Image (tube, grey):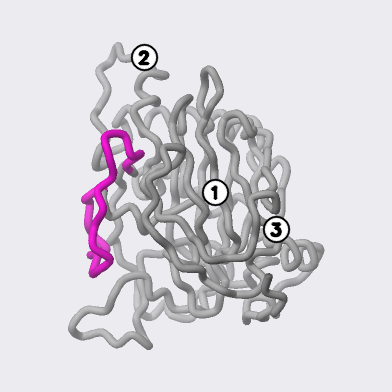
Amino acid sequence: MLHVVVTPRATRLRRGHAVSEYDRQGYLVLPGVLPPALLDAALAETTAICRGQRGDVDGVTPAADGADDDAVLRRYLCVQFPHKISPLMLDIARRSAVVALTEVIGPNVKLMQSMLFIKSAGKPGQAWHQDEAHIPTRDRSLAAAWIALDDATVHNGCLWVIPGSHRAGVLYPEREQHDPRFDCTREAHGYAYREQDAVPIELPAGAALIFDGHLLHRSLPNTASHGGRRALVNDYMSAESLLPWFPPGEDDTMGTLDHRDVHLVAGVDPYAHKGTADLMRPHVRPDGDGGCVRQARGVVSPNLTDQSSSSRFLD
């Protein structure tokens, strides 16, 4: 097992109680991030999004007025970029856990992605992966805030992590996988960790898990007899870092490539003079039911609404 520890710039900006635990384990658990009233509002908003009441989401079929809410929610595993159509989801992303995020990322923080997991009974999990393999920062500052909207348990498919697997700063290779427990996410491999090194992160509704973009993590299927494991996941990074999320165009250079569909949530944006863009489109992530679309590992346009493009957006 690797014992080399690489210190990224983001580590040097950390402060407060979070430093030792986050640097050692690669994650922090924050209780009570969403108070009860806001949690109830987020659950209602999840249903409204899945019913098609908040605007167009590629892959969402608007529900009939009399359709049962639970039946509607069971249609979907995950909606990508809900903050694009829901002011409430954007407000949660801008406000929830921001103090902890500035402690582990630095004073200037921007958001680039949100994901709304529904994960009803019987829905699959995701294979082992690292978020920085799909959302590359220049300073290893990527951090996710995984907010439980339901109690997240081993039975309904909570996250599992390998503590400390972020410390070497290595991004492991990925390959296609055909495990029926998982959706279409490619799996990381080639690391020395064992299955018994993994620990489940069970969370009560309203709590959050903050974790490093290099941390190996996965989830297993929801094997509960009923109910969902709803969660809102927001991805953040330092505002000082460029975001080369997609391959360069004809007039771009790799060194200055910067995806600007972002929201500043803390501090200042040194690249504010560039403005921001509206590129990403809300869409449903395929859950593998009926097979996965295996696309070539080539150029992917950032404004694609084809569901197969969601292999870039993980958690």
Q: Position of residue 88 (x, y in %)?
A: 47, 42
Q: What percent of the width, then of the height, locates residue 152?
A: 62, 34
Q: Secondary structure at mark 3?
A: loop
Q: Position of residue 127 (x, y in %)?
A: 48, 49
Foreground of the two, 69 or 2: 2
1 in magenta: no
Label 1 Cα neighbours within 10 Å, binned few <14 / some 14-19 / many ≥20: many
Hey, what amino acid is under mark 1?
Arg
- Type of secondary structure dominating the magenta stretch: loop
Q: Nearer the viewer, mark 2 or mark 1?
A: 1
Q: Which circle marks residue 163 in the picture?
A: 3
Looking at this rendering, what residue extends furthest in the top direction? 66
Instruction: Please report the residue visible at 37 percent of the width from the left and 42 percent of the height from the top.
Output: 79
Residue name at image x 36 percent, y 47 percent? 184
Residue at 30% x, 66% y: name it. 277
Q: Which residues are magenta?
A: 286-307
**Other-residue count near label 2 (Cα within 10 Å), few / some / many at <14 / 14–19 / ≥20:** few
Numbered tag placed on residue 218 in the rendering: 1
Horizontal side, residue 107 vs residue 228: left or right = right
Residue under pointer 2:
68
Which sits earlier in the primary sequence, circle 2 or circle 1? 2
Task: Find out whether the residues at labels 1 and 3 contact each other: C-beta distance under 8 Å.
Answer: no
Estimate how packed mark 3 is, as few (under 14), some (14 to 19) or many (20 or more) residues with alpha carbons within 10 Å. some
